[in-house]
Image: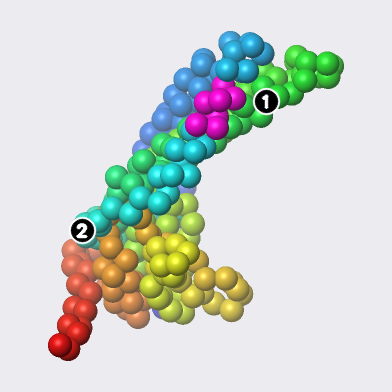
Amino acid sequence: MSISGPARASTQPGRDGLWSRRLFSLVVGGAVAAAAARVLLPTTASDLDAVRGLAWLATGVDLAQRHWRPRRTGRLVWRARVAGRHGTEPGLVARRSLAGWVGLVAGLAAGSTLTVGVISTLPDRWAWVAAGRPVLLAAGALGLGWFGYREVRFTGRLALTASGIRDGADWYPWSEVREARPGSRDRQDGVRLHLSPGRVWPQVIGGRGVTVSDERLLAAIEHVRVRPEMLAVGLPVTPPEPAPKPVPAE
C-alpha cells in the first residue's frame, strides 16, 4: 500500500528532516570517540595489564544484569516527527527502559574492557605489537564513537511508523511482517515477528529494553499492521490496550 502526503518519509537530500539529527549524532559520536581516545591512547603496556581483571568483572556484571526483569508499565507515545533510517515521519515510540539503559552501559563497559584486555595479552616479542597497539586502541575509540552515533541517531528505542517497525537500527517494513506473537519466556522476552518467506528466522523486538510491556506492544503492532496508513495522516494515534486476561473459573 502506497503512502502519500506530507507525512510520507522524504528521502530527498536536505529535505528529509534529518540533517539536524545527523549533525547532532556526529557531534555526540565525535565527542565519545575523542574522550575514549584521550583515555586509551596514552595507555602503556603495563597499564593494560591492570585492565584484565576489570574486563572479567565488567563481563560478569553484564551477564548478571540480563536476568533482571523489571515491571514495564509504559505506553507507546505519539510523535509527529520520528527520526528513522531515511527520513522523519509520524509514529508511535517506545522509550528505552531503565533495564535497557543499564544493559546498554553494562554491555558497552564489558565490550570495551574486554577489547582492551585482549589487546593487553598481545606479547611484546611480536615486532608489530609496539606500533600496532595504539592503532588497535584508536580503532576501539572510533568504534565507541560509532556506537554513540547510532544510539543518538534515532528517536526512541523502538518505533512504529507507516513505513514499518524500527527496533534500534533494524528495520522491518510492514509488507514483510506476516504475524506477531508473544516471545518465548523460556528464551527471550519480547514480541516475535514472523516475516516474509525470504527471512527464515523470526525476529524478537522490544522486551526488557523498552518501557512498554509485550502485551501492549503486540496489541499495537497487530492494530497497525493491517492499516499502517493511519500513522501517515499526521494526526495523533492512541494505541489500543491489550485484551484483558481471562479470569480462571473457581
Which color scheme does this rendered protein use? rainbow
Residue sticking out furthest to the front: 250
Residue 62 lies left or right of residue 72; in this view the side is: right
Residue sticking out furthest to the left: 250
Quarter of the picture holding the N terminus = bottom left
Query: Between residues 18 and 203, which one lies in front from this camera angle?
Result: 203
User: Magenta residues, as a range?
Assistant: 51-57
Query: Between residues 186 and 178, which one lies in front from this camera angle?
Result: 186
Residue 42 place in picture, x, y as percent: 58, 10
Q: CA distance from mark 2 to mark 1?
A: 42 Å
Residue 138 place in picture, x, y as percent: 62, 23
Q: Earlier in the sequence, mark 2 or mark 1?
A: 2
Marks 2,1: beta carbons within 8 A: no
Query: Between residues 214 and 185, which one lies in front from this camera angle?
Result: 185
Q: Is residue 211 above or below residue 224?
A: above
Quarter of the picture holding the C terminus = bottom left
Main secondary structure found in the magenta portion:
helix
Circle 2 — which element? Answer: loop
Q: Is residue 121 above or below residue 83?
A: above
Residue 10 lies left or right of residue 97; in this view the side is: right
Q: Which residue is mark 2?
A: 73
Q: Residue at x 19, y 72 (%)?
A: 241
Q: Quadrant location of residue 148?
A: top left
From this viewpoint, is residue 175 visible? no
Q: Residue at x 46, y 41 (%)?
A: 62
Residue 114 place in picture, x, y as percent: 58, 32
Q: Residue 119 bears which disc, if any?
A: 1
Q: Residue at x 29, y 45 (%)?
A: 98
From this viewpoint, is residue 242 visible? yes
Q: Amino acid at mark 2?
A: Thr
